[in-house]
Image (tube, grey):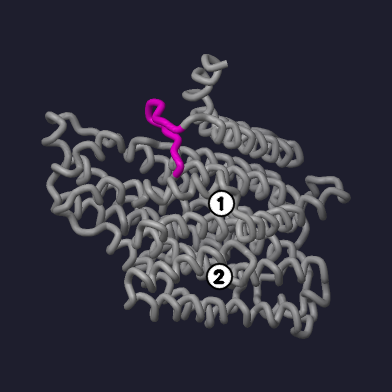
Amino acid sequence: MNEALAMLVPTLPGLLVALPVIGGVALGAIPSLRLAAWLNIALAAAGFALALALAALPFGVNGLLHIDALNLPLLLLGALVGLTTACFSAAHLPAEGFTPLTGRASHAAFQIFLGAHHLALLAENLGLAWVAIETATLASVSMVALHRGRAAIEAARKFLIMAGLGIALALFGTIVLALATQPLLGGEASLSLGVLRGVAAQADGRLLSLAFAFLLVGYGTQAGLAPLHSWLPDAQAEGPVAMSAVLSGLLLNAALHAILRAKTVVGLNPASLSPGALLLGLGLVSLLLASMSLWRRRDARRFLAWSSIGHVGLAAIGFGLGGAASVAAMLHLLGHSLVKTAIVFAVGRAGRRDLAGLAGLATARPILGWSLVTAMLALAGLPPFSLFASEFLLLQQGVTRLPWLSLPLALGLLLTALAVLRQVHAIALGLAAPSAGTNLPPGPAVLPPHLVPWMATVPVYLHLLLALLLGLALPSALYAVLAEAGRIAG
């Protein structure tokens, strides 16, 4: 039994990465859109099963990949969101108005994105993590452009330019990080996290500070942190619903994870600038900017994108504070991804882009409308959902450790919650819009009609149920993993 387990340790992480990439290439060649949709679900289900199997393996490094408490919760979350998004996408694909060609391209890009996302989390080498995030970004750009309208092409172009700038800055930061430690490695450059942490304390603190600044801004672009955040609202508004879900639920987390890995290296050097303070600063700016921008949004998906900017900023504040705040930040990332993807699915099912068109949805379509209301209440940080617990802990840590932080942090949380609750009031109690609940022009059906409601709505309920369970009764095993993740993040 032990020998069999030892053989699986190096195999499963690589398989989790390779399976969606190979599947994505195969999906692009399958002529049947219906078959491609079912294969997309099957690949995502296999990926989720592999991620669950990883949870049973011991932590450790296996070549270029590794498993630890910091990446395991995000891997499980990513695999789950990948599966629920694949199911929803199959049900919602006709409403996207895709041709068979663009439908297959959507599935292929989605699977390649999942493989790159998993690699970004599993990579023990910072250079490999950079390649993975670049690949995930390019796959996301291609999905944004799939509708091929003027707005979609412009959003994809903006995304490509901004993301390209961020990726270039992150590459420069990675190179500088290698240069800072090269003299201590006998001239042999290494980007292995274990090797870098072993020599970071003796490295040049100025070069490490410079490297982290570029990595923070570079990967912060993909994470949706200010100041290079402006691509996210356009990309999320113009891309397919599946792309919006993985942007909010997966790409932002993977990019923030890369920042945390760099923080664990730079933070070991006493002569470097405090990486936590830099991360806290960008997080606070992002939270305050998003909390004010939410009040001016009229498009539902742009509203959700700005909300993501604020929530990722809040998690960055927690990781910047460190300690118990890092544990709360990890919980916040999990809760935010679950709730935000549930809202994206519900809004996509409603078939309306404008917030005014969602008014009265609880009356016009009660099941869908009240599901959306519940998810929005969770997003606002109301109990008993997990975002309430994580925001309460983050506020408590901020007030206790940095009293000056209490005012801007409380202001950002309050403005964000009120902006979301204003939309909740309209959805639950407002007058129904004349065409509320209409769908986009239909395309070719890919699922039997009796399966469409289940595949479209079960993901919403499942995500909300998990967010509720995380808020009411966090399992002790998961808390232990999150506590260890907080220790690793610093």
Residue denoted by label 1? 143
- Mark closer to the chain start, 1 or 2: 1
Please say whether residue 245 is visible from this viewpoint: yes
Check if residue 64 falls in the magenta segment: yes
Give whichever of 475, 58 is nearer the camera: 475
The picture quadrant where one finds residue 434 is bottom right
- Up/down of 423 relative to 458, above or below: below
Do residues under tags 1 and 2 come within 8 Å of each other at their CB atoms? no
**Label 1 secondary element:** helix
Q: Position of residue 356 (x, y in %)?
A: 68, 80
Give whichever of 165, 272 is nearer the camera: 272
78 on left or right of 96: left
190 on left or right of 146: left
Kindly identify the amino acid type of the residue bearing the numbered disc 2. Arg
Residue located at (45% from left, 55% from top)? 327
Check if residue 249 falls in the magenta segment: no
- Around disc 1, counting alpha carbons within 10 Å, would you say few (fewer than 14), some (14 to 19), or many (20 or more)? many
Give whichever of 380, 15 is nearer the camera: 380
Please, which residue is most extreme toward the bottom here? 431
Residue denoted by label 2? 302
Residue located at (69% from left, 66% from top)? 347
**Label 2 secondary element:** helix
456 on left or right of 18: right
Q: Which residues are magenta?
A: 59-69
Residue located at (49% from left, 28% from top)? 14
Per the model, the C-alpha gap separating discs 1 and 2 is 17 Å
Q: Position of residue 8 (x, y in %)?
A: 53, 22
Residue located at (43% from left, 72% from top)? 287
- The quadrant of the rendering that contains the N terminus is top right
Kindly identify the amino acid type of the residue bearing the numbered disc 1. Met
Please say whether residue 172 is visible from this viewpoint: no
Q: Position of residue 289 (x, y in %)?
A: 42, 76
